[in-house]
């Protein structure tokens, strides 16, 4: 994982170096830069994960094409064998496959890539940019007064250079000749095609395969473990796969006290699957002090994203200090399976499915953004098996009649995921974890965390200032003092209108209280029981 920047248009090379260093936290290991004959420049800040010795970027293709890439291409070895058998590559880095596919197919190759990515290719007076299907990795683009086009992993590198700037849309590529082209067109984007029966073995095996892909690494890796269903499953699968190789697995959890909800649950999981477990503690004071720095890294003012990112920020720093550079995480499951507690209130199976599709389409603005930027702030790469293309095709295509929570029959959220791993011959998790109710990360570290943030904001923002919220912030007007406080800090670092409009607010549907915390949902803390999923 890395940070990339490219400027299409005659540009000073030294200036690009300076802009690139604004995101050097994403790639602390080495830097690289290339300038074409026409004066276009691309720069790369590298976090070395695959090919530690020859994988320096930008990477040249056969002749005039050069690529910069942030992400991982999990099928790069298969593509080398299928598409370029016998060809000698310059590196063993997974990124190099991108430039050779471009040279072979032009711009029409993104669907061949299995992984997460943002990339820019410069080929003399031509160029191309692309982003992975869900937007696991961040990318922004913009234009300056002279008409130059900019691309960057984080907007802090280019926001003050651009007259116009936007997030690059996930699942698209761009060339000057084609404009933006949507290459990722899964059938499940239309809810009427989500009509498949639930097959526990297929769902289970596809997730295991997804985790196995993401063990590709030339450096030590670990797992994030909150003690919730999603991270616990990923940790258990990872442990089982690594057991065959004799590798030990480190797991990491965070909370305010040893008795925090997530820490206690994670401890049970770690003992059960036998990881080398690390518990990280942070204080309310440390969390409050870090808010501004985390907002600078996140580049958002969304309340729920910031609440959850601060513990993840501290956790990531501690993980890197242990010598781990890659972790597997559970992001995406709640969107795919309707795991947030507000999904209990969906008025119909059809509306339930539409909302899962909507939430998946917004992952790049919320959970993916948080997972990437709060970890990359410390030079840590987070991998997300639930957002594998093949797994999503299986899971999203299952009829919502199987997935929708139903209190009347005792079917809880994400019941089919739980069922898929409860009917296995292998005991992946203790039942109390496998059937544990959803707890959002910002809540699970300790309820006093969010309460303290709210109280701090209430005491910091005067009533008379908050009363002018609609005048000060007419776009996405903050509706609480907490949101107002976050917005002030965001606009301190990103004051232009382009930055403000890159943010989407995470808002739950179908519940009376619009606070994004899961514990305000009516169903929270209700007892849950294991049920048999219909077949």
Image: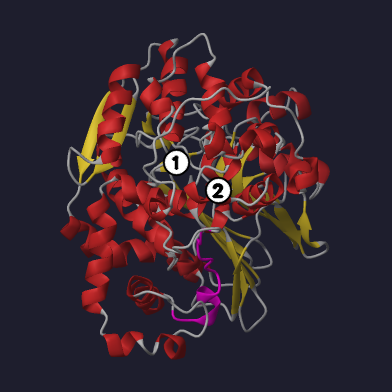
Residue 498 belongs to the span the image colors magenta: yes
N-terminal label among 2 and 1: 2
Q: Residue at x 47, y 29 (%)?
A: 217
Q: Residue at x 28, y 20 (%)?
A: 271
Vertical arrangement, residue 79 with respect to residue 44, above or below: above
Tag count in the figure?
A: 2
Q: Which residues are magenta?
A: 495-508
Vertical arrangement, residue 198 with respect to residue 246, above or below: below
Q: Which mark is residue 382?
A: 1
For the C terminus, the image quarter is: top right
Mark 2 Cα shell of 10 Å, populated few (<14), some (14-19), many (≥20): many
- The chief SS type of the magenta part is loop
Residue 44 visible? The answer is no
Q: Which residue is mark 2?
A: 343
**Gap between marks 2 and 1 measured at Cα:** 26 Å
Mark 1 Cα shell of 10 Å, populated few (<14), some (14-19), many (≥20): many
- Residue 157 horizontal side relative to residue 105, left or right: left
Could you say whether the residue bearing mark 1 is in a helix, strand or loop?
strand
Residue 226 visible? The answer is yes
Vertical arrangement, residue 54 with respect to residue 534, above or below: below
Q: Which mark is residue 79?
A: none
Looking at the rendering, which quadrant does residue 456 occupy? bottom left
Residue 153 belongs to the span the image colors magenta: no
Q: Residue at x 77, y 54 (%)?
A: 182
Q: Position of residue 523 (x, y in %)?
A: 44, 46
- Between residues 240 and 456, which one lies in front from this camera angle? 456
Q: Position of residue 492 (x, y in %)?
A: 36, 78
Q: Position of residue 498 (x, y in %)?
A: 55, 77
Could you say whether the residue bearing mark 2 is in a helix, strand or loop?
helix
Q: Position of residue 135 (x, y in %)?
A: 59, 51
- Between residues 69 and 132, which one lies in front from this camera angle? 132
């Amino acid at each position: 994982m890395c940070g990339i920047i490219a400027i299409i248009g005659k540009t000073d090379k030294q200036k690009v170096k300076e802009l690139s260093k604004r995101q050097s936290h994403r790639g602390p290991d080495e830097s690289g830069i290339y300038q074409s004959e026409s004066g276009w420049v691309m720069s790369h800040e590298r976090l070395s994960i695959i090919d530690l010795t020859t994988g320096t970027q930008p990477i040249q293709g056969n002749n005039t094409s050069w690529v910069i890439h942030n992400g991982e291409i999990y099928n790069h070895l298969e593509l080398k064998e299928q598409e370029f058998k016998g060809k000698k590559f310059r590196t063993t880095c997974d990124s190099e496959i991108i430039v050779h596919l471009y040279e072979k197919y032009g711009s029409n190759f993104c669907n061949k890539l299995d992984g997460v990515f943002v990339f820019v290719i410069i080929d003399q007076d031509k160029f191309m940019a692309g982003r992975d299907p869900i937007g696991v990795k961040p990318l922004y683009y913009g234009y300056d007064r002279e008409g130059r086009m900019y691309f960057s992993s984080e907007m802090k590198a280019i926001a003050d250079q651009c007259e116009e700037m936007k997030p690059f849309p996930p699942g698209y590529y761009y060339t000057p000749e084609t404009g933006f082209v949507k290459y990722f067109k899964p059938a499940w984007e239309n809810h009427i095609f989500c009509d498949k029966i639930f097959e526990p073995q297929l769902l289970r095996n596809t997730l295991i395969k997804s985790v196995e892909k993401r063990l590709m690494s030339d450096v030590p890796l670990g797992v994030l473990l909150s003690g919730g269903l999603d991270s616990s499953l990923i940790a258990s699968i990872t442990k089982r796969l690594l057991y065959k190789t004799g590798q030990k697995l480190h797991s990491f959890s965070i909370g305010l006290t040893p008795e925090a909800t997530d820490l206690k649950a994670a401890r049970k999981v770690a003992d059960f699957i036998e990881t080398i477990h690390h518990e990280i503690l942070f204080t309310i004071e440390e969390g409050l002090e870090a808010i501004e720095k985390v907002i600078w890294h996140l580049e958002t003012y969304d309340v729920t994203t910031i609440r959850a990112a601060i513990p993840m920020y501290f956790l990531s720093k501690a993980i890197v200090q242990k010598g781990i550079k890659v972790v597997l995480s559970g992001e995406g499951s709640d969107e795919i399976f309707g795991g947030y507690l507000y999904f209990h209130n969906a008025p119909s199976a059809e509306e339930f499915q539409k909302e899962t599709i909507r939430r998946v389409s917004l992952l790049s603005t919320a959970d993916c953004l948080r997972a990437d930027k709060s970890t990359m702030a410390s030079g840590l790469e987070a991998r997300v098996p639930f957002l594998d293309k093949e797994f999503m095709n299986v899971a999203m295509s299952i009829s919502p009649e199987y997935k929708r929570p139903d209190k009347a029959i005792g079917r809880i959220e994400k019941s089919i995921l739980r069922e898929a791993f409860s009917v296995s011959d292998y005991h992946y998790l203790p039942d109390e974890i496998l059937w544990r109710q959803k707890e959002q990360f910002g809540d699970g570290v300790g309820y006093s965390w969010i309460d303290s943030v709210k109280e701090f904001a209430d005491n910091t923002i005067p009533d008379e200032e908050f009363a002018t919220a609609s005048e000060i912030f007419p776009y996405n007007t903050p509706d609480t003092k907490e949101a107002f406080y976050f917005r002030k800090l965001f606009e301190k670092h990103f004051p232009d209108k382009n930055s403000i409009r890159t943010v989407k607010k995470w808002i739950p549907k179908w519940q009376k209280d619009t606070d994004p915390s899961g514990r305000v949902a009516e169903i929270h803390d209700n007892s849950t029981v294991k049920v048999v999923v219909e077949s």
